[in-house]
Each structure stands twice: as C-alpha cells, then as structure tokens.
Image (spheres, grey):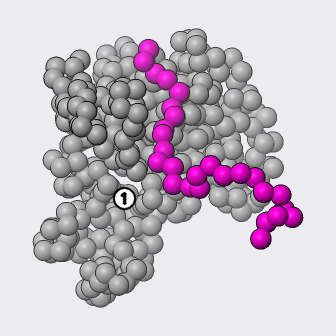
C-alpha cells in the first residue's frame, strides 16, 4: 500500500507519484502512471533500478549478504531441510507439516517417469549435442505430451503441470547426460529420495549395481536448495515475461532454461572452474592477480563479485563447507583446484583491491569444483542449475498468473534511429 508520495518535476510541471513499501527492503516509486501524466517514460538499461513486479517469494539484500526464501534464511534451509521441503515452501509459502511433506514427496516421486515416446525424441539429436540444448527442446516438448495440464486458467491443471516439471526435470537431465556419453537411460526408482534418485539415473549402468553415496547425495541436495530461487534474475524475468503472454507453463520454463544457458548467468560456475584450471597451481596466483588488476589485460577472475551481492555471498559459505565434505568423502586430499581456490579466497578477503571493489567469492567459485569431484562434466553444470531453479521459476510463474494486476510484459524504449522519411525507388537512390 502507498503511504507517501514522491514528486518529480518535468518541464516545470510537478507530478506526484505514490511510494510503495515492502515488508523489508527499499521502498519503490510507482511510475505506472508517469507516461499518462507527463508523456515520458523512464530509462533503465538492465532494469537495475526498476521493480517490474510485487512478490512474496524471495528477498535479497545484496549489501548485507542476505538471501531469504519466504522469510527463511538460506543457510538454515540448507543446513536443516531438504530440497523437496524447500520446493514446498517456495510453492505454498509455508514449511510443510510432516503429513504435508510425506504427501508432497509421494506425489513428486510418482511423477518422475516421462512418457515413453520421449525416448524416441532423444534419437533425433546428434550424438555430441550439448545437454542444455537437449533440455531446452525436451522441456518445451512436454507440452506436446501432457495436453491435460496446459490450461493456465485452471488451478488444478497449473498444479499438475508444476508437479510434473519438478518431478520430471531430474529424469530429463539424467537422460540428457546419458545420451551425451552414449549410455542407456536409467529409469527412476521410487524408493529413493529426490536427489539420490537423480544420482542413480546419472551414474548407474545396467552391468552392475549402483549404491548412492549419502554424503554426495546430501551435498547435491544442498546445492539444489542454494540454487532454487534468486528473486527477479534474468531467467526468472524471462519466465514471467513469457508467462505474461499466456504461454503454457512448459514453454515458459523452456524459455527460462534458454536464458539460463548464457555464460553470464548459469554458465558462471563452469567459467570459474576453467579459470582455476588455467591458473593451475597456487604459485601462479600472483601472476593472475596482477593480470586481474591490470585494466589493459582482458583477463578477469571468475567466481568473484556478484551483480546483486556487494558482500560475501551467503550461499558461498555453505558451498565452501560442502566442497570440503565432498572432497574428504572421495579421498581427494590434494586437489590442485581446491588449493588454488582456497588461496584465492584468502587473498580476495584481505587484498585491498578486492576489498575496496567488494569482489567477494560467490557460489560459482566453489560449486564447479564440487560438481567436478562428483563426476559431472562441465557441460552438465548449467543443466543441474536448471534442475534446481525449476521450482523457483514455477513458484514465480504461479504467483504471476494469480496476480490480478498482472499484464502482458511490454517494456518501452528510447528510440534513436532515423526520423520519419519517405520511400525512394531503387532507381532514384544514389
């Protein structure tokens, strides 16, 4: 609700605009009627100062390093909960009771199978197709298989579509991985939890029995929790914008996956891993630190700093601990990548250059090392991100659909092209 106003002066004319206040965080100036009153738009490349929606799902304070899902600190959820509990929280707004959680887990588990014709769908891809290319295609294709859950005006169909995507995303992700390495698909197993089931579908082979390592399963589950939602980022905004047109939910999530594929978004952990590999050993760090500080050198340290967080990324603390747990469990005592990572982190927290520019390690800094140690190739990193973020996209999409003030997204522009001019025939052109 508006509790105060802000005044803007345009060509000597003053216009009062309402100010809206959130539960926590900065207030916003409501400019929705600015054009009608002044004939002007605002100009905000990247929407860095614009709130395009009102949401109750996720809150971030980048200056203080705070991330809350429905009010709960991310570190508490990652430490004490599991991924499906977090899914329930993001979708319904509250943590589930024991009975609600048991029912939710059961419903997700019973939706993990995909239509058998999807197997034939995969054979249309090249053998060396990137797993993210497969994910974009397959998730979009779900609307061709599940016609009974594409009517967005029906709350029941929206619920079924939501459950289907949360449940089937691990199956599709594992199929994309298996296809890329030429191994047969492994079907889901209902007596396993969500993350253990995913690990089995990725790494089991018909020739031998596969036993899920509980430490790795717990670590991956924590990674999923940390990536489940992150407010109005590029891919989430894409899902909301696609959804505002009335597109079916499968198409909206496919659009989000396509956006996430960008190296500036979901591919950041892969870039951080490649950087650590390039540095190689701790004794090379000073050389690369100097390159990073040199404005004339194109080299950039990946995994440091964040567009939102101007403090230590709260997810990075949890990820650092998780990385050590995985490496210890796997008996990796002297991992050169981790040695480089730890040394870089210490420098970043103390070096005047990094402190002044607030270039703190972010979640991508550690997650790439952890996923590599688990056996995932770098081509799968963004797929795992998409798997985890699906629930956030769905929660944001559902919130938008149920918002009575929701309208089709239509950003304005500052036109700088040619003014109006008359057509000239080709014979008359100089």
Mark 1 Cα shell of 10 Å, populated few (<14), some (14-19), many (≥20): many
Looking at the rendering, the stretch of residues picked out in magenta corresponds to 404-430
- Count of numbered circles on the image: 1
Residue 171: quadrant of the picture: top right
Quarter the N terminus occupies: top left
Q: Position of residue 423 (x, y in %)?
A: 75, 52
Q: Residue at x 52, y 63 (%)?
A: 378
Q: Residue at x 69, y 29 (%)?
A: 143
* Element carrying mark 1: helix
Left or right for 196, reference 135: left
Quarter the C terminus occupies: bottom right
Reply yes or no: does residue 8 show up in magenta. Answer: no
Mark 1, residue position: 364
Secondary structure mainly formed by the magenta segment: loop
Q: Position of residue 288 (x, y in %)?
A: 32, 83
Q: Position of residue 322 (x, y in %)?
A: 30, 54
């Amino acid at each position: 609700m508006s509790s105060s106003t802000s005044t803007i002066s345009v060509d000597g004319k003053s216009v009062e605009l309402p100010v809206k206040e959130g539960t926590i965080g900065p207030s916003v100036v409501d400019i929705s009627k600015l054009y009608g009153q002044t004939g002007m738009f605002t100009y905000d490349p990247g929407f860095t100062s614009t709130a395009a929606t009102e949401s109750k799902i996720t809150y971030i304070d980048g200056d203080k390093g705070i991330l809350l899902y429905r009010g709960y600190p991310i570190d508490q959820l990652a430490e004490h909960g599991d991924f499906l509990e977090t899914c329930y929280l993001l979708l319904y707004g509250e943590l589930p009771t024991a009975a609600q959680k048991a029912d939710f887990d059961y419903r997700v588990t019973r939706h993990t199978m995909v239509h058998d014709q999807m197997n034939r769908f995969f054979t249309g891809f090249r053998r060396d197709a990137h797993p993210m290319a497969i994910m974009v295609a397959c998730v979009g294709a779900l609307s061709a298989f599940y016609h009974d859950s594409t009517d967005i005006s029906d709350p029941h169909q929206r619920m079924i579509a939501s459950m289907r995507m949360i449940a089937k995303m691990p199956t599709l992700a594992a199929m994309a991985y298996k296809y890329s390495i030429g191994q047969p698909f492994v079907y889901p197993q209902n007596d396993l939890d969500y993350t253990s089931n995913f690990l089995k579908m990725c790494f089991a082979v018909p020739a031998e029995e596969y036993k899920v390592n509980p430490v790795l399963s717990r670590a991956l589950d924590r990674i999923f929790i940390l990536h489940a939602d992150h407010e109005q980022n590029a891919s989430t905004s894409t899902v909301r914008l696609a959804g505002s047109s009335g597109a079916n939910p499968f198409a909206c999530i496919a659009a989000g996956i396509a956006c996430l594929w960008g190296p500036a978004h979901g591919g950041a952990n892969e870039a951080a891993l490649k950087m650590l590999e390039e540095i190689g050993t701790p004794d090379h760090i000073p050389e690369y630190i100097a390159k990073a500080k040199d404005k004339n050198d194109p080299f950039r340290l990946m995994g440091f700093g964040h567009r939102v967080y101007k403090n230590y990324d709260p997810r990075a603390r949890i990820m650092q601990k998780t990385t050590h747990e995985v490496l210890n469990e796997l008996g990796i005592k002297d991992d050169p990548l981790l040695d480089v990572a730890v040394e870089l982190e210490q420098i970043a927290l103390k070096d005047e250059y990094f402190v002044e520019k607030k270039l703190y390690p972010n979640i991508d800094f550690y997650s790439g090392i952890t996923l590599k140690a688990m056996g995932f190739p770098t081509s799968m990193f963004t797929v795992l991100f998409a798997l985890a973020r699906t629930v956030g996209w769905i929660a944001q999409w559902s919130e938008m659909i149920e918002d009575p003030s929701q309208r089709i997204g239509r950003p304005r522009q500052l036109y700088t092209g040619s003014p109006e001019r008359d057509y000239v025939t080709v014979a008359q052109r100089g």
